Image (cartoon, helix red, strand yellow):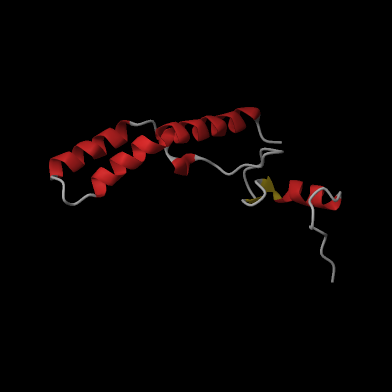
């Protein structure tokens, strides 16, 4: 089980990323628009830099919803490999069976 503070910090990052997504996308579009003047693009870059760091989508870590584990996660299930195997062994994931050959 991951530390509760780490899990809560990640949840805060998710909330901030959702809150600032539209503003961040608009500023990024301005910085990439070559038809605008250099000053306008530079001002947009400064405004983008003033946004909170944790509002960036890349700062969000994929964590297991059950255990909070930060490594070895499956995006499709939003679960770590360990939790996924445990649930699959108990037959709680439809269609998933333990492999044997």
Residue 54 or residue 16, whichever sits in front: 16
* Quadrant that contains the N terminus: top right
Residue 27, image quadrant: top left
Residue 27 or residue 51, whichever sits in front: 27
Give left or right: position of 6 versus 40: right
User: Which residue does the image show at 13% across and 45% down from the upper left?
Assistant: 37
Give left or right: position of 8 versus 52: right
Q: Is residue 91 above or below residue 11?
A: below
User: Which residue does the image show at 38% across and 30% down from the upper left?
Assistant: 52
Q: Position of residue 90 (x, y in %)?
A: 86, 49
Residue 92 or residue 72, whichever sits in front: 92
Give left or right: position of 94 versus 22: right
User: Which residue does the image show at 65% across and 28% down from the upper left?
Assistant: 4
User: Which residue does the image show at 67% across and 35% down from the upper left?
Assistant: 2
Residue 65, image quadrant: top right
Q: Where is residue 93 in the image (x, y as percent from the top left)?
A: 79, 50
* Quadrant that contains the C terminus: bottom right
Q: Position of residue 78 (x, y in %)?
A: 65, 46
């Amino acid at each position: 089980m991951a530390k509760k503070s780490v899990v809560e910090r990640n949840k805060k990052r998710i909330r901030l990323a959702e809150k600032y997504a539209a503003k961040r996308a608009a500023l990024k579009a301005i910085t990439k628009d070559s038809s605008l003047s250099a000053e306008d693009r530079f001002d947009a870059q400064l405004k983008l830099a003033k946004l909170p760091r944790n509002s960036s989508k890349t700062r969000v870590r994929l964590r297991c919803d059950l255990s909070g584990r930060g490594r070895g996660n499956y995006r499709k299930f939003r679960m770590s490999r360990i939790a996924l195997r445990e649930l699959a062994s108990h037959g709680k994931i439809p269609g998933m069976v333990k492999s044997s050959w």
